[in-house]
Image (cartoon, rainbow, N blue to C red):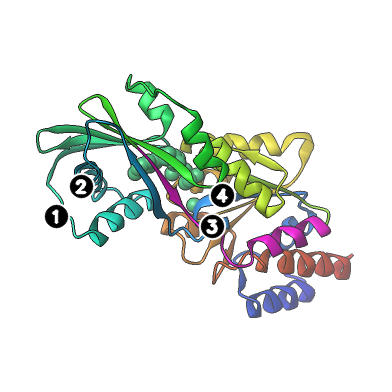
């Protein structure tokens, strides 16, 4: 039988937009030591915008953007949507993509008309053997908290671009409250290390696990679980499901993907992260009532 105080506690949490799908989750949350959060769509709004586009000599900005957007129109990734939106704003007509391959955590490549096009991280370019002449330009963008990306056309570097995804309202406050509750707060992301660190500084997050490939997110949670510490993972994407499952407690964003919602024990209905410290306080109070 579920103790009355758990029912009361989860009822109060629901009023604050935090849905406990299992009574046991109250105990786990009350005992948790670490809260690890996905970045895109969890700490940030998940609505990135193209902010910078520098094409290399010999390439034409409009044409490079057209090729990138033509390729990305077939991708579900938030970064892809930012590139497509930028092309549409300029009224560019997109071309048909002949083939498309997504390289999870790295980017996309494919054939657009007669061109081979690739868009993604410096790591993707390295894997495809495309040489990048100057890394400082990329680091400069990342220091501003933007995600730097490269585009390659027919095996040649064509552009350096950056996409910015603003922090969600309430993220800074939520992190501060979790710290006051004595919890360690960590960010786990596939994004560029410098970008992640810049955002972590803005958020006051001390532990950053960046450039984590999708299959590595569960392993990152396992790392944080060292010494028997209970870890909560908060995420929204398909990529996050293994980490949500690995964590002692999974929290999904209400607007997240179905897979994330199905895997998590707790759902933040509106995606407002301030619900987490509130739920921690309630869970701890509930545990005190039971003991
Ligand atoms: P996260 O969801 O943690 O932000 P992902 O694993 O989805 O990380 O992506 C990690 C990195 O892979 C991105 O920062 C970007 O560099 C690259 N990437 C992934 N998908 C795309 C895409 N469709 N277009 C361009 N780059 C991409
Ligand atoms: Mg996400």
The quadrant in which residue 87 appears is bottom left
Which residue appears farthest toward the front when viewing the image?
57
Label 2 or label 1, whichever comes before in sequence order:
2
In this picture, which residue range is highlighted in magenta?
160-180
In the rendered image, residue 165 lying in the magenta stretch gets the answer: yes
- Indicate which label's residue lies in the foreground, 2 or 3: 2
Residue 203 seen anywhere in this rendered image of the structure? yes
Label 1 or label 3, whichever comes before in sequence order:
3
Q: Which residue position is annotated with label 3? A: 44
The residue nearer to you, when weighing 35 against 75, is 75
The residue nearer to you, when weighing 55 against 196, is 55
- The answer as to whether callout 3 falls within 8 Å of ligand 2 is no
The reply to whether dot 2 and dot 1 touch (C-beta < 8 Å) is yes
- Indicate which label's residue lies in the foreground, 4 or 3: 3
Give the label on residue 38, or none. Answer: 4
Expressed as whole percent of the image width and height from the top left, the position of residue 11 reads: 68, 78
Separation of marks 4 and 2 at Cα, in angstroms: 30 Å
Give the label on residue 291, or none. Answer: none
Is disc 1 surrounded by few (<14), some (14 to 19) or many (20+) residues within 10 Å? few
Separation of marks 4 and 3 at Cα, in angstroms: 9 Å
Q: What residue is shown at x 75% (from left), y 59% (from top)?
A: 176
Q: Which residue position is annotated with label 2? A: 66
Look at the numbered disc 1 and give the secondary structure of its residue.
Answer: loop
Q: What residue is shown at x 54% (from left), y 57% (from top)?
A: 44
Expressed as whole percent of the image width and height from the top left, the position of residue 101 reads: 26, 36
Expressed as whole percent of the image width and height from the top left, the position of residue 138 reads: 47, 35
């Amino acid at each position: 039988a579920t103790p009355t105080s758990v029912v009361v506690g989860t009822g109060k949490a629901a009023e604050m937009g935090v849905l406990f799908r299992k009574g046991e989750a109250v105990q786990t949350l009350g005992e948790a030591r670490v809260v690890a959060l996905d970045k895109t769509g969890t700490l940030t709004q998940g609505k990135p915008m193209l902010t910078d586009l520098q094409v290399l000599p010999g390439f034409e900005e409009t044409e490079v953007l057209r090729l990138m957007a033509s390729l990305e129109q077939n991708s579900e990734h938030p970064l892809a949507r930012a590139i497509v939106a930028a092309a549409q704003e300029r009224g560019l007509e997109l071309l048909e993509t002949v083939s498309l391959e997504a390289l999870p955590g790295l980017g996309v490549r494919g054939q657009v008309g007669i061109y081979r096009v690739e868009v993604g991280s410096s790591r993707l370019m390295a894997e495809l053997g495309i040489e990048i002449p100057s890394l400082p330009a990329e680091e400069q963008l990342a220091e501003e908290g933007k995600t730097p990306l490269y585009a390659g056309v027919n095996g040649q570097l064509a552009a350096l671009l950056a996409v910015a995804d603003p922090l969600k309202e309430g993220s800074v406050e939520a992190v501060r409250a979790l710290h006051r509750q004595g919890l360690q707060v960590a960010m786990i992301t596939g994004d560029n290390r410098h970008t992640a660190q810049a955002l972590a500084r803005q958020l006051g997050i001390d532990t950053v696990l960046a450039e984590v490939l999708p299959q590595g997110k569960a392993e990152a949670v396992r790392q944080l679980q060292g010494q028997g510490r209970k870890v909560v993972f908060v995420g929204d994407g398909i990529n996050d499901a293994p980490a949500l499952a690995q964590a002692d407690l999974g929290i999904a964003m209400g607007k997240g993907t179905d897979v994330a919602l199905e895997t998590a024990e707790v759902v933040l209905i509106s995606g407002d992260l301030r619900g987490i410290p509130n739920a921690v306080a309630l869970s701890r109070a509930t545990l005190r009532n039971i003991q």
